[in-house]
Amino acid sequence: SEVATMMDVPVTQIISTCMMLGMMVTMNQRLDAETLQIVADEFNYTVEFVGAEVEEAIEEEEDKPEDLVTRAPIITVMGHVDHGKTSLLDYIRNANVIEGESGGITQHIGAYSVNVGDQKIAFLDTPGHEAFTAMRARGAQVTDLVIIVVAADDDVMPQTKEAISHAQAAGVPIIFAINKIDKPNANPDNIKTQLSAMNLLVEDWGGNIQSQEISAKTGQGVDELLEKVLLEAEVLELKANPNKNATGAVVEALLDKGRGYVSTILVQSGTLKIGDYILAGKHSGKVRAMFDDKGRKVKEAGPSTPVSVLGLDGAPQAGDKFNVFEDEREAKQIAAKRSQLQREQSVRTQKTLTLAEIGRRIALGDFKELNIILKGDVDGSVEALTDSFQKLSTEEIQVNIIHKGVGAITESDVLLATASDAIIVGFNVRPQGNARAVADREEVDIRTYSIIYDAINDLKDAMEGMLSPEM
Ligand code: GDP
């Protein structure tokens, strides 16, 4: 279907061409290079594999089951502002500094790991779903589990809902930390009631979502929370092979005046060693030195270990993947190629969905689900639009409201749209702050309306393939 879109022909014609070549294919099947050439030829196109040879040069070593060992879970903490994300991350870090470790001085490098009994847990130290989804939008699925902090003296708030949507869109299990239970007006049951109203039933209410009442201030319940993290991790059977070249993702990177570019990375499999040649996004270099989250020099880093690395020739972006190369030149060449390709592609391709594009893709038959992020000024209009949009679902195409909420369209909405191939509909609200600029860059379609009828009609027209481009 991708080929059909590129050549602007119905997908059925591609399928019948393949059948003529003796190949029974489905719409979502990947065609090999040779078949692509032949099919394109039938329609008088030539094929050029942009970037494929670049990425192919990166060899991923296959793991044998016997090489895999259990690795620590990697956690992101999300939740509404002021509900206690930072306090929880700080509490966990400070409570788990073993005496004598660099006098207890921890470094903020964007991630840290703690010992719980004889096991480890790694935390991403940038709380919030913005960081989480920004990484995911760049192709990095780093987080194994999400802790969503909800203050027990407050309610399930818009950003709580956003965090839930973001975790669900990524298919990452959630554990609720119901925080601030030291406060006299704390009412954890109120939170559980509100969650159950959203079809999120916690374990002690007979559901299957873990939750723990905690105080990030006194530390009450935090050990139990970490136990539950380990329990949930056990179910996920997280494994990696430590005995190969490292791969993983960039957590953050900055230019340090004295030390040059410092990149915090999370090793996901293999072991990173000093002297390794690495490629991360558009940058490369030799690992000159590595430091753990306590600022101590280390010589190597295995799976689920965060380290800051010196030696890259630039600052890669959060979510960029990294690989190790035997040959420094090769890493350099791929980095340069990637920069060049990115420049070219940003000119040439439309990578995300627009409303005008929907009708075309439906007509080509390669479109099954329409993902929408819906923001409005009041709950009433959001609910009314949700209902109406969902009623537009047909047998061929399912309309999904993957996130909805009251308030302006934020940068995080745009990032979620990028990661989930969604369009954004705003009702009596506008993009806020950086959201417009990010949407332009990521080519996310934002539609704003002030009349419900118009919003419904536009969507209906788009689904019927009748929307004129650019309205
Ligand atoms: P964030 O915006 O989610 O990172 O929230 P913070 O961690 O910055 O916390 C917001 C405020 O709530 C701060 O003043 C914290 O001291 C306070 N706070 C966080 N957790 C607790 C808690 O468990 N109990 C009490 N009493 N206050 C807390």
Image (cartoon, grey):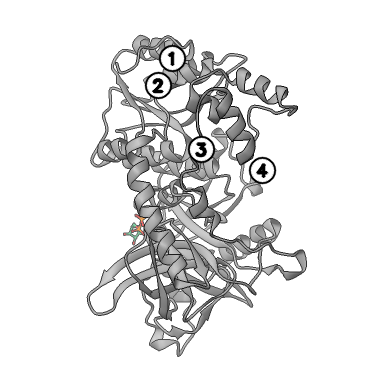
Q: Position of residue 453 (x, y in %)?
A: 36, 9
Above-or-below relation of 136 to 426: below
Three-letter amino acid code at the position of disc 4: Gly
CB atoms at circles 3 and 2 under 8 Å apart? no
| Residue under the image location 52 percent in, 45 percent down | 167
Quarter containing the C terminus? top left
- Asked whether 184 or 324 is in front, the reply is 324
Tell which tag, 3 or 1, sits nearer the viewer. Answer: 1
Residue identified by numbered label 1: 462
Q: Amino acid at mark 3?
A: Gln
Q: Earlier in the sequence, mark 2 or mark 1?
A: 2
Q: Identify the residue position indicated by label 4 in the image.
A: 207
**Quick one: label 1, few (<14), some, or many (20+) residues within 10 Å?**
many
User: On the rendering, which quadrant does ligand 1 occupy?
Assistant: bottom left
Mark 3 residue element: helix
Report crowding for label 4: few under 14, some 14 to 19, many 20 or more residues within 10 A (C-alpha): few
CA gap between label 2 and label 1 equals: 6 Å
Q: Earlier in the sequence, mark 4 or mark 3?
A: 3
The label shown at residue 286 is none
Q: Secondary structure at mark 2?
A: helix
CA gap, disc 2 and disc 4: 38 Å
Mark 4 → mark 3, Cα distance in angstroms: 14 Å
Residue under pointer 3 = 194
Where 66 falls versus 259 (above or below)? Answer: above
Question: In the rendered structure, which amino acid carries the disc numbered 2?
Answer: Leu
| Proximity of marks 2 and 1: CB atoms separated by less than 8 Å | yes
Q: Nearer the viewer, residue 33 or 439?
A: 33
| Disc with the residue nearer the chain's start (3 vs 2) | 3
